[in-house]
Amino acid sequence: MKIYNFSAGPACLPEAVLKKAQKELVNYGDSGMSVMEMSHRSADYEDIQNRAEKNLRTLLDIPDDYYVLFLQGGASMQFSMVPMNLMTTYKRAYYVNTGMWSKKAIAQVKKIGEVVVPASSEDKTFSYIPELKPEMFAEAADYVHITSNNTIYGTRYTKVPETNGLPIVTDMSSCILSEVIDVRKYGVIYAGAQKNIGPAGVTVVIIRKDLVGKAPENIPTMLDYKTHADNGSMYNTPPTYGIYIAGLVFEHLLANGGVPAMQKINEKKAAMLYDYLDSSSLFKGTVEKKDRSLMNIPFVTGNEELDKKFIAKCKAEGIVNVKGHRSVGGMRASIYNAMPIEGVEKLISLMKDFEKNA
């Protein structure tokens, strides 16, 4: 039975990528060894990482005045690294609160400087993106932080806020490479790999070069962006195999039309599922239509017992990891780049059958 994995992360990977990795697992090229056992200082591995960076730059049209860093520690590490490196002039930053990960970022930045929360959607269980206006960012600050896509609650920014010239820092963990973006509108983009990039363990940071090198001298060496920028992400041993898989994903995307092609497919997948939810008398979406995510689609029946029965039926039919996050309940379909349209079609078919017999 074909399994469709709707996990929010670690998420499914393109089958073609997994098969290529399987083929190269024991012997990469003519090296006689696996990438997992290869020295990160070897020519073979340096070529792997350099190609991964080059292809990511192509996919996202990343300008030369931005560094691309392959780090560790997940997006959660960035909750601390960002303010440690950027909150250096005014010791103040704006954080828009749109969900659990925004709240976790806010909790970390409070340890370092002053946090101003200009807007929050917590009043309606984070079911929308608050409207942001330039005047909300009138007070001097070092940067503005947003979470571009909210994995748990299924909301996304559909436009980049105007911030009176303040650099925008964004957590794109669950939406990077899913739709076309203008990197130049951001000061920092960071993303855990385990949703649209590759396996868990790699964190991609895209940072404007003028924002690097401002950290205080007492910052731990490994938490200074300059350390990694100056050493090509090889100050210490990088997560080599994770970067290798990410590189295969980048090659796969480039060979299949790049980000614009993925955006069209993602919009189609999301529209199919949202259209059904809007017409269903049993299943309901939980997000305001204007702010719906293309990647994470939460929905409920309104009855916990029915939710449990539906989740069990999904598992029996090969549709796994549709249980909603423990903090919100219900169901959630994460339809990242690697989720084929056939998986969404099967989920909708099962939902229709369940609704008919509920």
Image: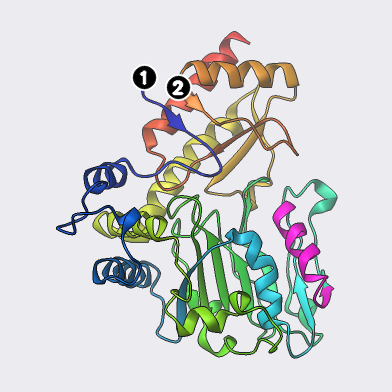
Label 2 to label 1, Cα distance in Å? 7 Å
| Display colour scheme | rainbow
Report if residue 251 is visible in the image.
yes
Q: Which residues are magenta?
A: 100-115
User: Helix or strand or loop: what does disc 1 sit on?
Assistant: loop
Residue at image mark 1: 1
For the residue pair 341 and 320, the one nearer the viewer reads as 320
Q: Can you name the residue that lies furthest to the top here?
A: 357
Indicate whether 261 appears above or below 54: above
Tag of residue 318: 2
Instruction: Measuring from the top left, give residue 257's x and y in whole percent.
Output: 28, 57
Judge by depth and name the residue closer to the eye, 186 or 243.
Answer: 243
Q: Label 2 is placed on what type of residue?
A: Gly
Residue 129 shows in the view: no
Within 10 Å of disc 2 (Cα), the crowding (few <14, some 14-19, many 20+) is some
Q: Amino acid at mark 1?
A: Met
Is residue 127 left or right of 56 when viewed as pictured? right
Question: What residue is at 46 percent from the left and 22 percent from the top?
Answer: 349
322 relative to 28 in the view: left or right: right
Instruction: Give residue 202's position: percent from left, percent from top.
Output: 49, 59
Q: Which mark is residue 282?
A: none
- 7 lies above or below 191: above
Q: Does residue 83 appear left or right of residue 293 in this picture?
A: right
Residue 172 inside the magenta-drawn segment:
no
**Residue at 31% across, 60% down:** 38
Q: Nearer the viewer, residue 347 or 232?
A: 232
* In the image, residue 101 lies in the stretch drawn in magenta: yes
Rendering quarter of residue 52: bottom left
Label 2 residue SS:
loop
Q: Is residue 315 above or below residue 42?
A: above
Residue 132 x, y percent position in the rendering: 73, 69
Between disc 2 and disc 1, whose residue precedes? 1
